[in-house]
Image (tube, rainbow, N blue to C red):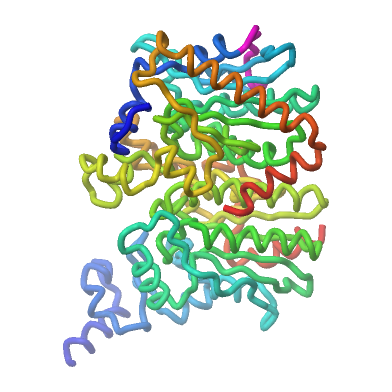
Amino acid sequence: MIDNLTPWDKVKLARHINRPTSSDYISKIFDSFIELHGDRYYGDDNAVVAGIAKFNNQNITVIGQQKGKNLKENKKRNYGMPRPEGYRKALRLMKQANKFKRPIILLVDTPGAFCGIEAEERGQGEAIARNLYEMSDLQVPILSIVIGEGGSGGALAFGVSNEVWMLENSIYSVISPEGFASIIWKDGKKAPEAAGLLKLTAHDLLELNIIDKIIEEPEELTLDSMDDLITIIKSEIEQFLERYASISENEIVASRYERFRSM
Amino acid sequence: MNGDNFMLKDLFKKSSSTPSKIIKESQIPDGLFQKCLKCNDILYSEDLVENYYVCPNCNNHIRVNPRERLSMVLDEGSFMELNREIDIADPIGFPGYKEKVRHIKSVTNLNEAVITGRGKINGTDVAIGVMASNFLMGSMGKVVGEKITGLIEYATDCRLPLIIFSCSGGARMQEGMVSLMQMAKTSAALKRHDKEGLLYISVLTDPTTGGVMASFAMLGDIIIAEPGALIGFAGPRVIEQTIGQKLPEGFQRSEFLLEHGFIDKIVKRNQMKKILSILIKS
């Protein structure tokens, strides 16, 4: 555990190129994973990796926002910024999980939903809104884990869950510190200051009751140092699944509704 | 004084140059005239009110405050406000924020960026919410989210059709993540309203962007927009910065959304009550 990090330090850590990505967590947490593609409307978004995984012999639908580890990969993954197709693929597979009674685990790691001409043309706002709306009514337990960056509405569309956890040095914010600084102070360079004001760290958000759990990180989180973290996450997921196994579908929906209703 | 008289007379003269070039805004007598910000035409305020605040010259649907909006669509005297007073939320203790909200409350004579309540449209009861673009850009913080969610739940409990007129810059950053959560809260409440088989009509007015556009505004059974309204997830300036080029004319306007299949209908302001009345009875 690293102490005395400023919020801005955490922003930089959350975005670090060496930080493990969704596919790293998927391959290490689950016994098997079969990827499924496409939104059935327009295309397949590489910024979202989704499929069916096995966890202690239980089927789980897993969906993650996927960043790349180098420039080439990031071009393919669009730096983890989903287009409407990505949100629609996620929703399609969440509804499928609901049909087959599979719990859903979502991995959040995005600077935000992609903003560009084609994203607007294909209804970025509608796609995000639809996810919030439909997720609120799914009868299976949903868990979101913010593993890196939780960028605004683009992250929330993966976050209408029964529980939301954050890795210790991940962030979750209504707007990027740079965006905030340039709007409020007309000066993007004041981002470090904005990071402090925005209350975007895991500890701040636990205090605000926006998230439910913080998962401690090793001192320098990379692919090589993540094994202990994986052990902790697996044990936490096991307990999560146990907690919800005995709860009725109605209660799962009602408790999720109350979680957000009280905010 | 003579100068003022001259300017007033000059307004009604046929002139080669537009009145806006002759008259500075400060010289227009208060309340009597208003300038259309789109075509710069000088409009006689009384005509403008009669014309639903639509510029007769260029059809610009000028932004209206929520009380005027309510009077345009509801039967006279039928409005009953819900949740009028909710305490200012300042969840992240943002410096100067409470004072700013108090100040805006006093200058706008509004309690927050939305008014919610119940009223009648040609005799039919509806739950109705109207956002105010002049209150911190109609941004959605905890109070706005609470008022809208309260309205939706009221509509569900009373089995009423629901109408929300949106105009908003999005989530209110000064409330941090709590403002983002309002998107989930309002959308979840709409899902419950929907499951009861009730009608929700979302009316998009200029501008409807960001977190409001990406939540309750796009979730109507029927989505209507006023002509020429800016509607989008990301603001045009953000997109221009991201892609490094100018956006085409008409991008993210109501007509663009209609063409791309994201709204049902564009309705002019003077037709709005009639169309809403037909739809809630259908």
State whether the magenta stretch is mostly helix, strand or loop: loop
Question: Which residue is outermost to the bottom?
Answer: B1
Q: Is residue A248 magenta?
A: no
User: Is residue B97 in view?
Assistant: yes
Q: Position of residue B166 (x, y in %)?
A: 55, 57
Query: In terms of depth relative to the viewer, which is nearer, B146 or B158?
Result: B146
Query: In terms of depth relative to the viewer, which is nearer, A217 or B166?
Result: A217
Q: Left of B190 or right of it: where is A111?
A: left
The residue at the point 43 percent across, 30 percent down is: A168
Query: In terms of depth relative to the viewer, which is nearer, B4 or B140?
Result: B140
Q: Position of residue B202 (x, y in %)?
A: 64, 54
Q: How many marks?
A: 0
Name above or below for residue B228 compared with residue A160. Answer: below
Over which residues does the magenta segment extend? A30-40
The residue at the point 77 percent across, 70 percent down is: B125
Q: Position of residue B34 (x, y in %)?
A: 36, 74
Query: In terms of depth relative to the viewer, which is nearer, B281 or B101?
Result: B101
The residue at the point 39 percent across, 37 percent down is: B248
**Quadrant assignment, res B81:** bottom right
Name above or below for residue B78 compared with residue B88. Answer: below
Q: Where does the N terminus of chain A fall, quadrant-wise? A: top left
Q: Left of A230 or right of it: where is B176?
A: left
Q: Position of residue B213 (x, y in %)?
A: 53, 47
Q: Left of A13 or right of it: where is A109?
A: right
